Image: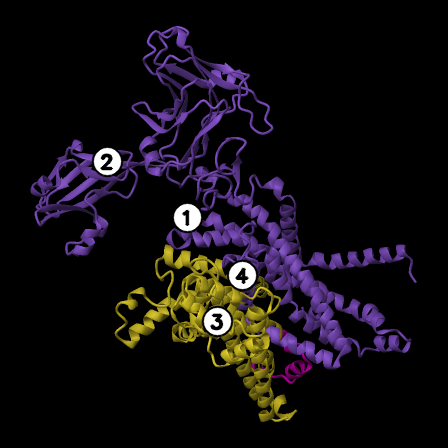
């Protein structure tokens, strides 16, 4: 009997010999490198991924009082941030010309007019198509500025229409200010209107307007904010200043700072007039494209006796936009005031080109001569752009996930499912194969017929049926269900190989010798047969991981995965169910799904390559042939 | 054992397989704790009590377990799968009218092309083993082996539908046929082929790698046998050795694999059909998994699974028959 030390040194020697063999296989080394790469990513996922993989949010602590867990980190369907470094992506102002054909008629005395876009127009246009078009010119891009409208009459004469005769409906529709009746008399049918307008295209990053929205230091107020009021000319009536005592305390944060608005009614000479205070922060919006979404937030504490009105405003050089308003009563505590979403049309009409804007909070204290002190804290405005993160965002609502983070965490699921399934099914296969081969007789026959049955079944339909019925029973799908199912139906091929190997091994001379020496069944299997089967075990372990990974991804792709678990299959499912594939396709959103697919293929292929290399080393017959 | 006895034995074996599949069906859907069928019936019953009565009778809802088992046995053997609430038609009609022929067409086409292309490349590669071509092909096959089929499909859609705009993104036939059916048989065939190209291509790319590897392995296995060396030593032409001595013997295990590959292609077809919106069994499955209003159409799933398993069993049986006819050992053993 060898001592423990000898045994260890023998094992090390054997491993070294094996490693020397393995080193020669380029495929094997490549596979091993890929597996190690993904294992590192899976292990350090929380350090690598910048956000939570599922429903990432800017936590509620940052913006207290909002109804959900937090607010979205970015808008849906963002492109990766490095798109802005790609020179072929167009940015800036485009001048676009589109043509519309005019068609007007009277029906029971009522005038009907249509502007038919050139793309759908043909001289023999069918009436049903005409009805589908609209009585305004619906251009294909957002209008930044309307440049010119040229009228081409059917006889070929051209004239320039005055811009004043047209107005914008929203941001993509141009409507005539002339009434329809005179329009029909003015222009014959099939008059062509050539519209020239400019439209901005840009990649917009997320913008946080207020740097220190919790007002932690007095500088955060003095450097960023300005204010004015309608009673500024009166001394000591209204004052806005930094206050380091009355701030809102959110969760564990220790900051006490806030803005305090003081209205001193005693000094007011015209108490019958409302007091308006506008607190504003200037910022530059550098993009041609408007933001995708907007979030505004403030915590307001009104200590005065009467309710005050607070409004969010965006002030452009030429216009003020009031976006939301709320009455805040005196409740002796902070109340939240927020604006969660603004539709794109509104944003398009506010942000058209690079300009300077002001984010403003308008506070109206009603007339009545009551001295009022208002505290403001957590005042912020977020503008959501259309680029974000390393791989953009998906389309989930309300919280789109950062695709890169999901991808990083997804390596965990794939590795766990692949490895556990391989280990469990190999153990089952080994066990049944050994029993079947060594015991023989009716046990062998039974196990083998059962194996045949399971091998005949079409796998994916079977898995679908099983996952669906498990889902129906338990109400949800989990990763473990998939592991169990894959294990239960993944051992057959291996059991067969083991059995045939055992059948030939047990007739060998060394087994006979062991029998003659009085060794028991267990001893013979454990000491003489198992070591000879182990080579096959290693190969099978490596070779059965890929199919598990791919099947898990396929099931998730079909929507049978765990929706709360960040996996590569979930990325694929979200992409597939978003419908992007048949409209814009991989060309526009390749970064969403390409990395996940490549990761699945790479990881699966890596295990195949390692298995192949192991097979070559451990299976001498194969080696001879080369 | 003669050929007749061999066929008889396979027949009995096939019958046992079918019985086992039915039993498995019963286990998954009716006998295991939770009982999906019962859950389904009670859910449908809440929506419409009339269906509850029909379904409860068909599946023997309140009967003891053994009676339920015999009912399942009878239902599945007579292809009486019950009534689909969603399609408002007997399930067997939904499957046989359009879905199953579509799927068999797609799978058959894909399998034939796969086998021809795979064996051709496999033979060439095995013959020139060790070269750059061999290494490249083997590596490429190993990789396509592990690429999920929907990825292949997406790439094909992007190239051929969105970029080149040559082929339709989905469907089994032109959508316009719903209103005005094709006038001539040629138009019909052309329309079908036009819509078959992409799904078939995806399936072939997905499964051809396995065939290349298998053919290569089988040929390498025989090429090192003694009788091949003898044939070469006799001075036979290399081509004669390859076709008469190597290929003939290597083809036997390949034939067994035709049936197994069929089972694999069923899995591939499920996903391909879903992706390309091809009105076959795969698409039907996908629609059955996600019913409007949540939950899954369990009876339909049961029928689909049973029919697909049956197809594979039949394919196996046919492969066994061909094997018996080709392999001389079966006749003389």
For the residues carrying marks 1 and 2, which lies nearer the camera in this image? Answer: 2
Mark positioned earlier in the residue sequence (1 or 2): 2
Q: Residue at x 40, y 63 (%)?
A: B277
**Which of label 4 and label 3 is nearer to you?**
3
**Distance from label 4 to label 3 (Cα)?**
18 Å
Camera-side residue of A347 and A307: A307
Circle 4 chain:
A
> Mark 1 falls on what kind of element?
helix
Tell whether label 2 touches label 3 (CB within 8 Å): no
Q: Which residues are magenta?
A: B219-244
The residue that disc 2 covers is A168
Q: Secondary structure at mark 4?
A: helix
Q: Is residue A72 above or below residue A573?
A: above
Which of these two is toward me, B159 or A568?
A568
Between residue A504 and residue A74, name the one nearer to us: A74
CA–CA distance in space, label 1 to label 2: 30 Å
Residue drawn at x 75%, y 77% as measured from the top left = A503
Label 1 sits on residue? A588
Q: Chain coloured yellow: which letter?
A: B
User: On the rendered structure, is B284 left or right of B189?
Assistant: right
Q: CA distance from mark 1 to mark 4?
A: 37 Å
**Residue beneath label 3, please?**
B56
Subunit that carries the residue with mark 1:
A
């Amino acid at each position: 009997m060898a001592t423990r030390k000898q045994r260890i040194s023998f094992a090390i020697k054997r491993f070294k010999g094996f490693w020397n063999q393995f080193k020669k296989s380029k495929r094997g080394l490549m596979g091993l490198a890929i597996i190690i790469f993904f294992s590192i990513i899976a292990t350090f996922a929380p350090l690598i991924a910048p956000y939570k993989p599922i429903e990432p949010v800017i936590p509620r602590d940052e913006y207290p009082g909002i109804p959900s867990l937090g607010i979205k980190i970015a808008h849906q369907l963002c492109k990766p941030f490095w798109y802005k470094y790609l020179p072929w992506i167009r940015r800036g102002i485009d001048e676009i010309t589109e043509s519309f054909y005019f068609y007007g008629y009277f029906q029971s005395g009522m005038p009907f007019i249509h502007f038919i876009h050139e793309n759908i127009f043909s001289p023999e246009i069918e009436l049903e198509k005409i009805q589908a078009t609209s009585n305004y010119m619906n251009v294909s891009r957002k209008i930044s500025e309307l440049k010119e409208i040229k009228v081409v009459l059917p006889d070929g004469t051209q004239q320039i229409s005055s811009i004043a005769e047209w107005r914008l409906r929203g941001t993509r529709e141009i409507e005539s200010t002339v009434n329809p009746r005179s329009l029909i008399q003015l222009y014959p049918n099939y008059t062509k209107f050539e519209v020239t307008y400019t439209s901005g295209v840009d990649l917009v990053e997320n913008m946080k307007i207020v740097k220190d929205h919790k007002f932690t230091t007095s500088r955060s107020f003095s450097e960023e904010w300005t204010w004015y009021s309608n009673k500024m000319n009166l001394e000591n009536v209204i004052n806005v200043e930094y206050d380091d005592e009355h701030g809102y305390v959110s969760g564990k944060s220790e900051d006490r700072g806030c803005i305090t608005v003081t209205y001193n009614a005693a000094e007011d000479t015209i108490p019958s007039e409302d007091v308006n205070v506008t607190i504003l922060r200037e910022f530059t919006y550098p993009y041609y494209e408007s933001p995708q979404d907007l979030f505004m937030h403030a915590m307001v504490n009104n200590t005065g006796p009467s309710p005050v009105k607070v409004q969010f405003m965006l002030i452009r050089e030429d216009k003020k936009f009031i976006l939301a308003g709320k009455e805040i009563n005196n409740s002796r505590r902070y109340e939240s005031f927020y604006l969660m979403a603004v539709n794109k049309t509104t944003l398009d009409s506010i942000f058209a080109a690079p300009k300077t804007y002001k984010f403003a909070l308008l506070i109206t204290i009603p007339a009545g001569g009551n001295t009022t002190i208002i505290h403001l804290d957590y005042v912020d405005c977020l503008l959501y752009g259309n680029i974000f993160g390393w791989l953009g965002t998906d389309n989930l609502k309300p919280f789109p996930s950062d695709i890169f983070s999901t991808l990083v965490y997804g390596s965990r699921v794939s590795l766990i499912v692949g490895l556990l399934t391989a280990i469990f099914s190999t153990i089952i296969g080994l066990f049944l194969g050994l029993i079947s081969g060594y015991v023989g007789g009716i046990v062998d026959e039974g196990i083998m017929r059962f194996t045949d049955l399971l091998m005949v079944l079409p796998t994916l339909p079977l898995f679908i049926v099983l996952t669906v019925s498990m889902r129906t029973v338990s109400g949800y799908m989990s990763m473990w269900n998939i592991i169990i199912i894959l294990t239960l139906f993944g051992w057959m091929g291996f059991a067969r190989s083991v059995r045939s190997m055992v059948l030939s091994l047990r007739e060998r001379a060394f087994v006979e010798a062991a029998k003659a020496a009085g060794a028991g069944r267990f001893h013979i299997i454990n000491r003489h047969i198992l070591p000879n089967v182990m080579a096959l075990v290693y190969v099978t372990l490596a070779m059965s991981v890929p199919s598990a990974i791919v099947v898990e991804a396929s099931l998730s792709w079909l929507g049978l995965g765990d929706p709360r678990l960040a996996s590569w299959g979930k990325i694929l499912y979200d992409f597939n169910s978003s419908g992007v594939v048949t409209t814009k396709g991989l060309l526009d959103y390749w970064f969403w799904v390409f990395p996940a697919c490549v990761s699945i293929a790479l990881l699966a292929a890596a295990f195949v390559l390692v298995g192949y290399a192991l097979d070559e080393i451990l299976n001498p017959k194969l080696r001879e042939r080369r | 054992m003669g050929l007749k006895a061999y066929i008889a034995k396979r027949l009995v074996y096939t019958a046992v397989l079918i019985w086992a599949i039915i039993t498995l069906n019963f286990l998954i859907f009716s006998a295991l704790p939770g009982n999906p069928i019962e859950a389904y019936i009670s859910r449908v019953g809440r929506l419409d009590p009339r269906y509850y009565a029909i379904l409860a009778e068909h599946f023997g809802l309140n009967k003891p377990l053994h009676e339920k088992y015999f009912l399942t046995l009878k239902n599945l053997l007579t292809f009486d799968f019950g009534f689909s609430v969603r399609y408002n038609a007997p399930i067997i009609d939904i499957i046989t009218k359009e879905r199953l022929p579509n799927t068999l067409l797609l799978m058959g086409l894909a399998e034939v092309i796969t086998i021809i292309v795979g064996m051709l490349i496999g033979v060439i590669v095995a013959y020139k083993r060790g070269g750059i071509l061999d290494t490249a092909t083997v590596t490429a096959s190993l990789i396509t082996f592990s690429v999920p089929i929907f990825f292949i499909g997406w790439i094909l859609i992007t190239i051929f539908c969105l970029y080149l705009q040559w082929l339709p993104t989905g469907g089994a036939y032109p959508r316009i046929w719903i209103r005005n059916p094709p006038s001539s048989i040629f138009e019909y065939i052309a329309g079908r082929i036009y819509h078959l190209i992409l799904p078939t291509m995806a399936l072939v790319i997905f499964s051809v790698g396995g065939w290349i590897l298998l053919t290569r392995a089988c040929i390498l296995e025989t090429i090192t046998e003694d009788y091949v060396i003898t044939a070469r030593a006799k001075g036979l032409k290399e081509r004669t050795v390859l076709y008469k001595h190597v290929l003939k013997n290597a083809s036997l295990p390949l034939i067994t694999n035709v049936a197994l590959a069929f089972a694999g292609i069923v899995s591939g077809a499920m996903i391909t059909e879903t992706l390309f919106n091809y009105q076959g069994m795969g698409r039907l499955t996908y629609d059955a998994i996600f019913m409007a209003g949540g939950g899954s159409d369990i009876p339909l799933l049961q029928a689909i699974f049973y029919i697909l398993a049956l197809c594979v069993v039949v394919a196996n049986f046919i492969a066994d028959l061909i094997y018996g006819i080709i392999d001389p050992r079966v006749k003389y053993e």
